[in-house]
Image (cartoon, rainbow, N blue to C red):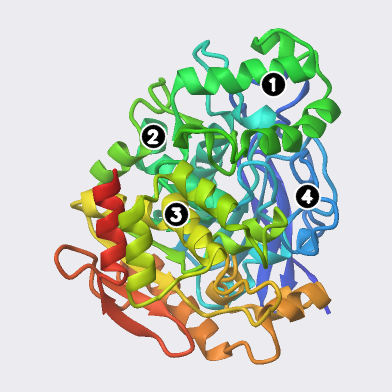
Amino acid sequence: MVQTQPIVRTESGNVAGVEDRGAVRFRGVPFAASPFGANRYQPPVAASAWDGVRDTAEFGVGVPQARFEGDPFDPYFNPIVQGQDCLTLDIWTPDISTAGLPVLVWIHGGGFMTGTGSAPAHDGFTFARDGFVHVGINYRLGIDGFTFFDDGVENLGLLDQIAALEWVQRNIAAFGGDPSQVTVFGQSGGGVAVMDLLGMPGARGLFARAIAMSGSPRAATTPDSALRVTRRLAEILGVEPTRDAFTTVSVERTVAATLPMAMEFLDFSQTGVEAFTVSPYRAVYGTASMPHSPLDAAAKSTVPLMTGTLRNEATGFLAALGLLPNLPEAVGQQMRHVLGADGAVERAYRDGPRGLASPVELAEAAWTDWAFRIPTLDLVDARTAPSHVYEFRWESPIYPPRLGANHALEVPFMRDDLAAMRAIGVAGDSLLGPDAPSDLARRMHAAFAAFARTGDPGWPAYSSPERSTMVFNTVDSLENDPGAADRRAWRDAR
């Protein structure tokens, strides 16, 4: 049974929370005005004040976004309802009458194309249960959030995230949180965003710690490259490549063009790594909002960082592209060539401890390392501030295709919430299988909570030469420089 809780006053008006399993939740709380209409393709502006008490019992609408037809995990990661008044927060707190609680601000993934902070995958109850105020945020996605016009206004989706963090600084004490103890964390696109925010001047001072899960500091681009994407989008939409022209295109049409552009961008026949990435919707550096590349800027950040990747990040992508369980050697070799995985890298995979041999294994390992693991290690190797590194290796039992420790599999473990994934039905049951280790979920969740509370997840910081790395699996282990031969081969290949 749920019951209305005492009212909390925010800067825009009063909100009524709902008791849920001993915690209190607030859904759909605005942190900025609708980013459409007169505000479209503009930086976020403050939400309008309201009279009376705002009901927060129901989910707010998700940001307008494309849907992947037939995706069995759509209800786990993505919004049930979309709409334009979408720059909102979901807040969980153990007790609105307390004070000084650590705060976690979650940035959802989805390649800057899909997702919502209020999805079942991102439910904040388990962190509220353990003494945190948890905030899940929305931000503009796809064409509306990440198109670059080279006119002095850019990175709108990231500016939305900064606006949400600023709102947290001004308002979270009313929910029991300590604004000086904010940890920003995110996975996939959210992990990329965390790395972006580490180097953005506008985000400085808005969080004390950061956790980047399956991110990459290289998933950003230059103005020239971004303008090529904008010109191609303009061709698809039939308008000039300007901000004013794009405002004449309906939201429905920009949403409809989002995925076709992404699939066109992901073309294995192209040469050059710049063309080969998961999403054309990326941060643009060398700009006012992001003067330096995320790798260079985040390396100089003094904010303590925890970051990690999964052993088989790319298997899910290959499966979605129809390349699993069988991949022709010619296609695999072409992929590896585009990524720059030369003979030394292949030999490290074949002759090292993993003993990879098939075209599928080699292509998947190359994509995982190029897109996620190696850029992440480049970042922590360049940092002087404390960094803690992990690798998630527990394997999904799904076969075929053999997904292994695939992208996003760690999310329900990190949240100690395997039930939420199983609740979506057959897909969730299949991905986790009947014997998913609940002990692993508790341990991983505890490590993330410890880092957010103290900056120490329970293992040594990553530094050369040891490069201490926590490996999360059925039985956890602390390893020094796991995959060292692969890492050195990639370094030499560049």
Side of 379 relative to 232 (left or right) = left
Where residue 400 appears, as percent x and y from the top left, is 71, 75
Give yes or no for contact between labels 3 and 1 (Cβ–Cβ under 8 Å).
no
Residue occupying image coordinates x 72% and y 65%: 120
Q: Quadrant of residue 422?
A: bottom right
Residue 2 appears in the figure: no
Residue occupying image coordinates x 23% and y 73%: 460
In the rendered structure, which disc, 4 or 1, sits on the residue that comes first in sequence?
A: 4
Where residue 350 appears, as percent x and y from the top left, is 38, 69
Where residue 347 appears, as percent x and y from the top left, is 34, 63
Q: Secondary structure at mark 1?
A: helix
Examine the rendered structure and indicate whether residue 243 appears above or below residue 261. Answer: above
Q: Amino acid at mark 2?
A: Met
User: Extreme left residue here?
Assistant: 465
Give yes or no for contact between labels 2 and 3 (Cβ–Cβ under 8 Å).
no
Closer to the observer: label 1 or label 2?
1
Q: Amino acid at mark 4?
A: Gly
Closer to the observer: label 4 or label 2?
2
3D distance between C-alphas at marks 2 and 3: 21 Å
Using a 10 Å C-alpha cutoff, classify the residue at mark 3 as few (fewer than 14 neighbours), some (14 to 19) or many (20 or more).
many
Give yes or no for contact between labels 4 and 3 (Cβ–Cβ under 8 Å).
no
Residue 372 has which mark? 3
In the rendered structure, which disc, 4 or 2, sits on the residue that comes first in sequence?
A: 4
Q: Disc 1 marks which residue?
A: 233
Using a 10 Å C-alpha cutoff, classify the residue at mark 4 as few (fewer than 14 neighbours), some (14 to 19) or many (20 or more).
many
Q: Disc 2 marks which residue?
A: 200
Side of 284 relative to 52 (left or right) = left
Image quarter where the C terminus lies is top left
In the rendered structure, which disc, 1 or 2, sits on the residue that comes first in sequence?
A: 2
Q: Nearer the viewer, residue 20 or 244?
A: 244
Residue 60 has which mark? 4
3D distance between C-alphas at marks 3 and 1: 27 Å
